[in-house]
Amino acid sequence: MVPTMTSPSGITNFVINNGNGVKGLSEMGLKSLPKQYIQPLEERISTASFGIKNSEETVPIIDMSNWDDPKVAEAICSAAEKWGFFQLVNHGVPVEVLENVKEATHRFFELPAEEKSKNSKERSCSNNVRFGTSFSPQAEKALEWKDYLSLFYVSEDEASALWPPACKDEVLEYMKKSEILIKRLLEMLMKRLNVKIDQEKEGLLMGSMRINLNYYPICPNPELTVGVGRHSDVSTLTVLLQDQIGGLYVRGGTDKKTWIHVPPVKGSLVINIGDALQIMSNGRYKSIEHRVAANGSKNRISVPIFVNPRPSDLISPLPEVLASGEKAVYKQVLYSDYVKHFFRKAHDGKSTIEFAKI
């Protein structure tokens, strides 16, 4: 037991500064949730009031075994317009690659705190490798029950040199094997908008990538906190690998007020539209709020790949989308400014997109 754990500064020190993360707190067998993690009532995920209102309302599951079938592209584009979220099965990324990256995620988080914290903001040898906890602890009134390793991909050489040895090979393989799927999805989504992907457009849509390894340890009083608060992603697309524990909720239903659980489907990948694509499609494709519940009995992991524009890109509704005379809903913004705006505040639903609204 850490002597100063009773004080808020003691917990901050233990979790953040000493690199123990919430995993360290969880493993101490706490009987009650430290008060820094208690979310306001309106942000808690209560199973009584959240979830599926009826069995028909669920995120679409799309079989991609025949990629060239026009029905597949139709299903994907319709899901991107209506839901902003869908699950893919038979997507072409080998199951063994997915299993390996899940194992590598556990392997990294099992490392001693001293080893993991070599990658913390204060100690990491690169801004592109970051071990941390919660979301933006300096901006949050209540912390989130999650630890993460965030890896920004610049090149294979840099990743091989700087990413943690416990997971780098498996993560790189997962990114490589997902690239064909990402390109195919973007082709389908762009075709619907009458946009042809040339080299310049490819750079704009997927010119940079970040991958996060997320760890949600067992939580005392999970009903009082969240794994991740309400937000939409700032990406073009996010490709999420989740384990079999469950806990991801998206805002959906006909009223868009229901929180709907995205049940884990073995071997599947969850795709969601990010704010960058909502802006570029002038709102046709929807970037939807989502959140993650904490779990009182199981450790959960997830591995999202964030497919993004380059930081130096200017993003705005694509000219092809506005060609028919449609009025632009969003102005031109520098992508790095948009991302900075997202990270300088706590998770707050869909409010980041207001930054780009006309």
Image (cartoon, rainbow, N blue to C red):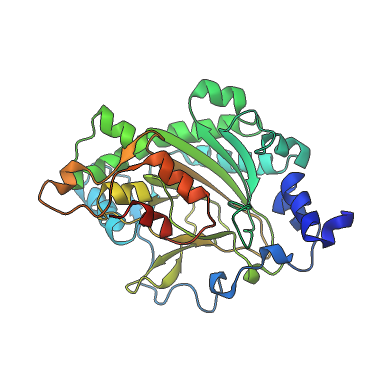
Whole-percent x, y for residue 29 in the image: 80, 61
Seen from the viewer's position, the closer of residues 240 and 33 is 33
Residue found 38% across the figure and 46% down from its top? 237
Say which quadrant the C terminus sits in: bottom left
Q: Quadrant of residue 139?
A: bottom right
Residue found 30% across the figure and 33% down from its top? 202
Say which quadrant the N terminus sits in: bottom right
Seen from the viewer's position, the closer of residues 276 and 341 is 341
Seen from the viewer's position, the closer of residues 107 and 136 is 136
Residue lying at the far bottom of the rendered structure? 48
Residue lying at the far front of the rendered structure? 358
Q: Is residue 190 left or right of residue 166?
A: left
Q: Is residue 46 left or right of residue 278?
A: right
Residue found 30% across the figure and 57% down from its top? 79
Vertical comparison of 197 with 7: above or below: above
Vertical comparison of 273 with 156: above or below: below
Whole-percent x, y for residue 282 in the image: 24, 52
Vertical comparison of 173 with 293: above or below: above
Vertical comparison of 203 with 288: above or below: above
Q: Is residue 250 visible in the rendered structure shown here?
A: yes
Q: Is residue 310 left or right of residue 327?
A: right
Q: Is residue 92 visible in the rendered structure shown here?
A: no
Whole-percent x, y for residue 166 in the image: 66, 33
Residue lying at the far left of the rendered structure? 324
Whole-percent x, y for residue 7 in the image: 81, 61
Q: Is residue 296 left or right of residue 347?
A: right
Q: Quadrant of residue 220?
A: bottom right
